[in-house]
Image (tube, grey):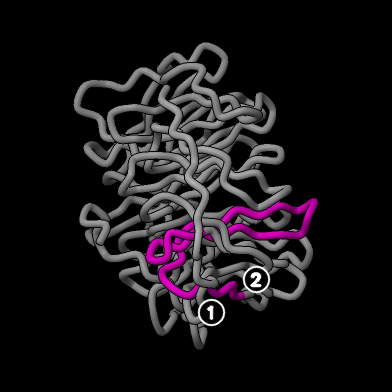
Amino acid sequence: MFGRYQGGLVALTVGFVIVASAVRSDSLGDTGSISPLAASQELKTSGEPFGIAVDAQSGRAYVTDLKTDTVFVFDLGSGAPLAYIPTGRQPNHIVLSGALAFVSNFSDASITLIDTSTNRALKTLAVGGLGLAVNRATSRVYAAAGSRVSVLDGASGATVAALPIPAGANIWGLAVDSAANRIYATDIAAPRVLVYDGASNALVGEIAIDAPARFGIAVGAAGRIFVASYTDQSPQLSVIDGPSRKVVAHVAVASFTAALVVDETSGTVYASSAVDRSVTAVSATLGGAPTKISLTQSPGGLAINPLTKELIVVTPGGAAPPVRLNVDPTTVTTP
């Protein structure tokens, strides 16, 4: 299962224990600690949940489940499942663009395109399979597939371009700064972040980090980029100033960070580690020690509930999807 994903991808959280963790000496600030986390919300699928996307307007969350090849649709208010949508094999990341959901299928190296108004799969795109990111200002969706990053029309799913990938690069994680129209990509083959201009799709630079990163990349306010190295050797969160493309701080995080999310209200950054079975919270001002929340088992993807501002963690232990007697085939679209 997911042979190339080191550390496993199951997600279960029970019994939070808050402990302090140290900040590296080269980070900004080294005293105090951030406030304890607000109560978290669990959204439970039946197999191995991984990715999550939240629609603030409809009050729904969409969670991928690797084991059941399903997207679970939840009501954010009650936490109850509303629908179950079949996908390709081993769905991992998911992003929303208008009335569409783009779901990246690892084993099929494809994307399932879903109509969120009907909760039905529309078609399969023969691109992607790894990280996804959306630019809401331009309605462009970026889909990573190792040696290729496809640029898709967020309204139709049509492939409109591809980003140039350096020889030997292996792109897994993506993040977009919509305000600056910049795309940031992690390269698991090298300790760097590639930077692309969204208007021209040109590669405009790269930023060195401590160790290669996978899916642990996110954009915060004021052009700050957060990237977590995927390693067990002094792993850290690199804080990058987007305009200057400079690393401005390092914060110690748990090994093998699987996902990052930035709380837009507080600016707090949350990082989940499947191997360490924890979530680390990093202060927006980087002025205090991170807060580490130890879990009984491995967490998966993270999100912020727009209704309650709580941290959402996806977990197993929920009811299984109903048996599918007939599943409508979806048309496969090639780029």
Instruction: State the image quarter where residue 304 is shown.
Output: bottom right
Q: Residue furthest front?
A: 325
Who's the residue at 50% across and 59% down the image?
A: 326
Query: Is 298 drawn above or below residue 92 in the view shown?
Result: below
Q: Which mark is residue 318?
A: 1
Q: Position of residue 292 (x, y in %)?
A: 47, 73
- Spatial separation of the CA atoms under disc 2 and disc 1: 9 Å
Task: Tell me if mark 1 has few (under 14), some (14-19) or many (20+) residues whose alpha carbon lies within 10 angstroms of its own.
Answer: few
Secondary structure category for the residue under label 2 = strand
Nearer the observer, 59 or 30: 59
Q: Which residues are magenta?
A: 42-70
Which amino acid lies under the numbered mark 2 shown in the image of this protein?
Pro
Contact between marks 2 and 1 (CB within 8 A): the answer is: yes
Residue 287 visible to an observer of this rendering? no
Instruction: State the image quarter where residue 258 is shown.
Output: bottom left
Task: Tell me if mark 2 has few (under 14), some (14-19) or many (20+) residues whose alpha carbon lies within 10 angstroms of its own.
Answer: many
- Is 156 on the left-hand or right-hand side of 294? right
Who's the residue at 53% across and 26% down the image?
A: 152
Which amino acid lies under the numbered mark 1 shown in the image of this protein?
Gly
> Is the C terminus in the top left, top right, bottom left or bottom right quadrant?
top left
- Is 136 on the left-hand or right-hand side of 232? right
Who's the residue at 39% across and 36% down the image?
A: 128
Q: Which residue is mark 2?
A: 81
